[in-house]
Image (tube, grey):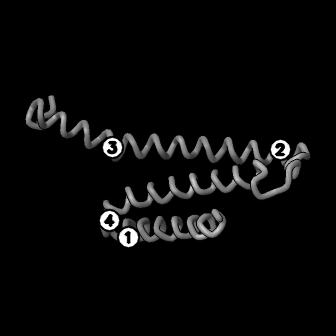
Amino acid sequence: MLKPLAGPLSPGALQVMYFYYTCSGIGIKLAFFRIFITSMQIAQFVTGMSYLWVVYAGAVLPPGACSTPGQTFAFTFQFAYVGIVLCLFSHFYYNEYVNKKTKSKDARKEGGGKKD
């Protein structure tokens, strides 16, 4: 169920990123792409973690399929790594796109947008 989603997300996100970086490199400003890229990457991590959890938690594989120490380590490492990266990207998204808008609205209300 999740595999058809997870497959195209990674190359799709990379293609959008490289397009954005190419345009930036030649001087074309596409600021609106930044939030789109970050959202795509977060979706990629959520889908990947969901797929990983479904497969290794036993919903797809028979019970005990992740029974060797190597498989257990691989699952734990992947899940922890993707979880950390997801937290970092989510934190960046919040600070860059959500909290920044709130701060600028508050600054306009309090002092007309003037900086001290």
What amino acid does circle 2 point to? Thr
- In the image, taking residue 30 as reference, residue 109 lies left or right, namely left
Badge 1 crowding class, 10 Å Cα cut-off, few under 14, some 14 to 19, many 20 or more, is few
* Nearest to viewer (mark 1 / mark 4): 4
For the residues labelled 1 and 4, the Cα–Cα distance comes to 7 Å
Sequence-wise, the earlier of marks 3 and 4 is 4
Badge 3 crowding class, 10 Å Cα cut-off, few under 14, some 14 to 19, many 20 or more, is few
For the residues labelled 3 and 4, the Cα–Cα distance comes to 19 Å
Sequence-wise, the earlier of marks 3 and 1 is 1
Residue sitting at x 18%, y 39%:
105
Is label 1 in contact with label 2 (beta carbons under 8 Å)?
A: no
Labelled disc at residue 98: 3
Between 84 and 26, the one lying in front of the other is 84
For the residues labelled 1 and 2, the Cα–Cα distance comes to 42 Å
Residue sitting at x 41%, y 67%:
20
Labelled disc at residue 72: 2
Labelled disc at residue 23: 1
